[in-house]
Every structure is written in C-alpha cells, then in structure tokens.
Image: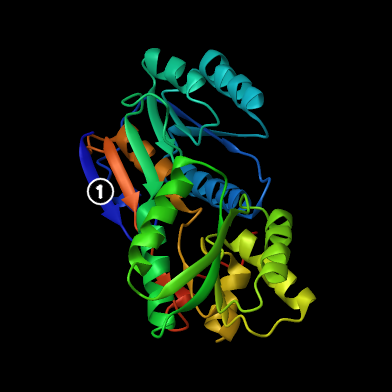
C-alpha cells in the first residue's frame, strides 16, 4: 500500500517536513487502549506528550485523545468523535476492525497503529513495529550470547499474528545454533501469568541456561520466579519493548538483563505526527511506516531511557 518507510525509532521532528499550514481548522481524533499494562502506559504517555507539542506547533489543529478499556468503549469514543467533533482524521490502535471501517467509509482519513485490521486496505496509513525483526534481533542476540549453544525456555505473548511473527523470526535466527528450546508457553504479555509459567518451567527443567521472555512485562514475572526459586543456573533473561527499569539495568551492566530489544510505545508519536503533517500540508504520508527493532546494549542504553515515562 503506497510507500513503505523504515525507521529505527519513532520520528522526532516530522513537523519540520510540513509546508506552511493551511488556514482552516483541522480536528484529529486519537483513540488508543487505556493504560492497562506497562507498554500501553508508555503509549499513553507519548501520545499526550506529542499532542501537547503538536498543538503548540499547529494552533489550527485540535487533537482529541480518548482511551478505552474495551472494544465497546472504543466504539462509543470513535462514534462521538465523528458525530460531535467532526474529525478530519483518526489515529487508532484498534480493538476491532468494524468501527474503523465505518469511519473510513465516511471519508475520514484513517491511520492505524500496531494492530492490523481484519480487512486489508481500510486505512490510509499504517504505523507499526517490525515484529518479525523483533524476533530476529532477539534470536541473533541469544545466539551470540551463547556461542556454544544451550538450553532455553521461551514465553510467548497473547496468541496473535504479531506473536506468531515474533516467534518465527526468533526461531529462524537460532536455527542451527545448538540452542534447544525446552519449552515455549504463552505468558500473555502479563507479569503474573509469566511468573506462573516460569515457576512451571523451573520445576520441570533442572537446567535452564537463558530465557527469552519476548516482552519486558513478562520478563519481570520471569525474574521474580527465578529469584523465588533460588535458581542460579539461568545466565540471563531477554525481554523487549524498552521498559525503563530494564533499560536502566542494561545500562548499568546487570548480567541478568544484559540487553533489550526495542518495540517502542513511542510509535504512537510517529502515527500522530505523520497524520497531522499529512493534514496540514501536501506531504505524501500514505502507506506503511515500519519502525525497526534495535538491540539495546550497555553502550547505547541511555538513548532509549525515558525517565518520565511510566514504562
């Protein structure tokens, strides 16, 4: 669909791309899930920060933010944006495709973030992380950190296409590296679930050399289970997404968290900013913007540490 952009991080100052602003007022709706877990909390933080900044740059743009705890609430929020606010564009991380389809059919510009829709071609712009790349970068680090191979366990996220892509990238990267996956179970991107999963792994396997948690919230649960069991055989835990506590531990050379892999919640900033640029100028922004995953190490961790973010 259109042009494909690739970037290592969410765009920082895309406003500079915009031509002189048009005179008429523009309303952009932003609908995202509420802060029900760490990554979503970070996304909400970056969304609010971006909205405040862009409204100063573009006084003719009104950005309306809503956060929803479930699909029904998001449907209501979006319907209100269309009916009461008359939005010109919608930036959405959708629970479901239906309400987004209705908005697109009404002629409103639609930017979808992170989760693909069940029907292709609804959105004008798609902004997402590189999930296959997330798994590949994770697997490449695992293979490099364990040159002689070893025994690992892995925690998957919620059963989704996104999770499937991450796992496929990871497995391809460790293929032929003498790394044995003892077990791979869904931790659902949840600390408590992951604590339980890791407890089971620890009871079943007397030797575990490393853990791929595939998400920092899950890594927190994994680490707690390892500590509770008093196990010292696990050399390191590799999470991902850039939780600030994990980034700090990598920065400070904690051997248990020696690296991280980005899947930045700040991608919401890219989605909002590109949408606004497209509304106020003739800059072409339709298509797909893929934000690549980066390996975070002690050498570059400071670049990915956001102390004011809740995540």
Q: Nearer the viewer, residue 13 or 309?
A: 309
Residue 161 lies, in percent from the top left, at 44, 41
Q: Nearer the viewer, residue 247 or 219?
A: 219
What residue occupies the far right of the structure in this picture? Answer: 228
- Residue that carries the numbered disc 1 in the rendered image: 5
Judged left or right of residue 164, residue 48 is right
Judged left or right of residue 167, residue 274 is left
Number of residues whose C-alpha sits closer than 10 Å to that of mark 1, classed few (under 14), some (14–19) or many (20 or more): few
Q: Is residue 132 above or below residue 144?
A: above
Q: Is residue 160 above or below residue 14?
A: above
- The part of the image, by quadrant, that contains residue 306 is bottom right
Q: Nearer the viewer, residue 241 or 269?
A: 241
Label 1: element kind: strand
Q: Is residue 227 above or below residue 169?
A: below
Q: Is residue 196 visible?
A: yes
Q: Residue at x 55, y 87 (%)?
A: 253
């Amino acid at each position: 669909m259109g042009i494909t952009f690739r970037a290592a991080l969410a765009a920082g100052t895309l406003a500079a791309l915009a031509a002189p602003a048009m005179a008429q007022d523009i309303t952009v709706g932003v609908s995202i899930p509420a802060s029900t877990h760490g990554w979503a909390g970070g996304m909400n933080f970056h969304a609010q920060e971006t909205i405040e900044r862009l409204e100063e740059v573009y006084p003719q743009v009104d950005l309306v933010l809503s956060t929803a705890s479930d699909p029904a609430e998001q449907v209501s929020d979006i319907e209100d944006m269309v009916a009461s606010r008359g939005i010109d564009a919608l930036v959405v991380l959708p629970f479901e495709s239906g309400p987004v389809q209705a908005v697109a059919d009404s002629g409103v510009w639609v930017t979808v973030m992170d989760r693909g829709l069940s029907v292709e071609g609804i959105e004008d712009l798609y902004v997402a992380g590189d999930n296959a790349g997330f798994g590949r970068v994770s697997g490449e680090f695992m293979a490099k950190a364990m040159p002689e191979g070893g025994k690992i366990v892995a925690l998957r996220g919620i059963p989704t296409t996104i999770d499937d892509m991450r796992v496929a990238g990871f497995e391809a990267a460790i293929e032929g590296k003498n790394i044995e996956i003892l077990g791979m179970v869904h931790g659902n991107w949840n600390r408590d679930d992951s604590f339980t999963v890791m407890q089971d792994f620890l009871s079943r396997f007397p030797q575990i050399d490393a853990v791929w948690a595939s998400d920092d919230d899950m890594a927190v649960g994994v680490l707690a289970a390892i500590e509770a069991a008093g196990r010292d055989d696990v050399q390191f835990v590799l999470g991902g997404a850039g939780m600030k506590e994990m980034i700090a531990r990598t920065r400070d050379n904690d051997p248990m968290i020696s690296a991280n892999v980005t899947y930045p919640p700040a991608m919401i900033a890219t989605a909002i900013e590109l949408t606004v640029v497209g509304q106020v100028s003739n800059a072409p922004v339709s298509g797909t913007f893929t934000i690549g995953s980066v390996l975070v190490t002690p050498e570059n961790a400071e670049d990915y540490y956001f102390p004011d973010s809740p995540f």
